[in-house]
Image (cartoon, rainbow, N blue to C red):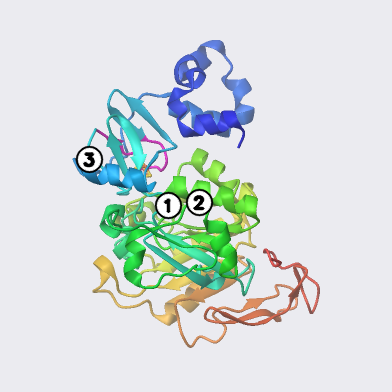
Amino acid sequence: MNDKRRDNALNPLENEFWAKRLTRRDLLKTGIVGASLCWCGRAVGWLWDTNKITDATQDNPGVFKGGAPTDTTFQAWQRRGWVREAMYYRKDGTKVQCALCPNRCILEPGDRSHCRTRVNRDGMLYTLGYSNPCSFHVDPVEKKPLFHFLPGSRSFSLAIAGCVLRCMNCQNWEISQKRPDETKRADGPEVRLSPSRPYLENLDEVARLTITPDELPALAKATGCASISYTYSEPIAWYEYTFDSAKAARIAGVRNVLVTSGYIRTEPLRELARYIDAAHVDLKGFDDPTYQKLNSGHLQPVLDTIRTLREAGVWVEIVNLIVPTYTDHLPTIRRMCEWVAHEVSPDVPMHFSRFHPAHRLAHLPPTPVETLKRARDEAKAAGLRYVYIGNVQGVPDAGTTYCPKCGKAVVERDVYSVVSIHVREGRCEFCHTPIPGVWNV
Ligand code: SF4
């Protein structure tokens, strides 16, 4: 990003031109709206940022009034480097409004955001999710899951607590539905990793662990990873760390993987996408009322995210977790797959994932394997070429990639392990048909 764009991104409100001079009314008066349509995606983003604070989405009651940490905690976290000013927000007096995701939280001084990572302190918005992972692990990239992206490679995977959604079925709610300050401690000696010691001695150390964005690429390389995955919770909730880390990794030649709900506004997504190589996007259903009830979000922003990532050249795979009685309606699954095939691309891999009882839906049974197979049939009938079933054991071809032309198995997997691969230079080894994806490290 050049300096000017970086300045805007850091604090759009301090840009005099956009914040004060070029209001929406000014544009209408001067008649340059039509002329600005050629860069309309960018213009809309900034115009939104120039407005006064507006109502947050009506179904976003999740701000924690008075939930910011104490002065002592905040200052201790600042000393650790675990606090940063947010990149996307606007001010109105001492109130702030986050401009990062569609929730658009409005915070008064002392409040904490819906995603639990952001606080208003003295009229400024800060993130508490920076350089302070509560979890990290070296995973096969297939575990993300990504099946058409550097198969068989490892990914340095990490998370900070927090999420922009509140899914009733969340499998990782112990970190996604926690405040960063419930998972980390800024007292006692700080723990750091290094390329010569890239692992912790014991799990307790993770609470005092710091990994800065600049340290991440060397740790990834030292652990034999071709990529860094921002995963487990929701990297949009800790956007600033994801952004700075992805930028550092790109410079160092390490790939970046975003594992996300896709619940983000378009402008910050476009900026982040400049450094992202692959994304797993959870498309949690295709029905807005169910999205609201099950996930506390809306469908359309996620669809926008899938399109935006593809337009930005990011390799995208979609995961649809089928939750019994919520998202197992086969005609709706068919409509979702038709949308992907016709509006995005038939080459986007679709992973149907099995629900296991968890969090607030612990009373439901796991998704029947038969339902997953029928969803796969619907997806293929809708025109999708690469369809997988995940979170299951004992379904022989659940993770097999077939060549769409000759029908032969070009990648065989056993859960997260690659058993055989017959893709060379991005083509089927048998009939030389291109197989979309990123195949070479
Ligand atoms: S990123 Fe967090 S603070 Fe910002 S609008 Fe979304 S939920 Fe609210």
Q: Is residue 53 above or below residue 436?
A: above
> Is label 3 in a helix, a strand or a loop?
helix
- Who comes first in sequence, dot 3 or dot 2? 3
Q: Nearer the viewer, residue 277 or 42?
A: 277
At 49% across and 22% down in the image, what residue appears?
15
* Mark 2 neighbour density, 10 Å: few (under 14) some (14–19) many (20 or more): some
- Who comes first in sequence, dot 3 or dot 1? 3
Q: Quarter of the image containing the C terminus?
A: bottom right
Furthest residue toward left? 66
Q: Quadrant of residue 285?
A: bottom left
Q: Nearer the viewer, residue 407 or 181?
A: 181
Q: Quarter of the image containing the N terminus?
A: top right
Q: CA distance from mark 3 to mark 2?
A: 26 Å
- Is the C-beta of the residue carrying label 3 under 8 Å from the nearest atom of ligand 1? no
Q: Amino acid at mark 1?
A: Ser
> Is label 1 in a helix, a strand or a loop?
loop
Q: Inspect this view and state whether residue 257 appears.
A: no
* Mark 3 neighbour density, 10 Å: few (under 14) some (14–19) many (20 or more): few
- Who comes first in sequence, dot 1 or dot 2? 1
Q: CA distance from mark 3 to mark 1?
A: 20 Å
Query: Which stretch did the figure color magenta?
Result: 98-108
Q: Amino acid at mark 3?
A: Asp
Q: Nearer the viewer, residue 144 or 240?
A: 240
At 58% across and 62% down in the image, what residue appears?
227
* Disc assigned to residue 213: 2
Q: Inspect this view and state whether residue 312 appears.
A: yes
Q: Which residue is mark 3?
A: 71
At 60% across and 70% down in the image, what residue appears?
224
Furthest residue toward top? 29
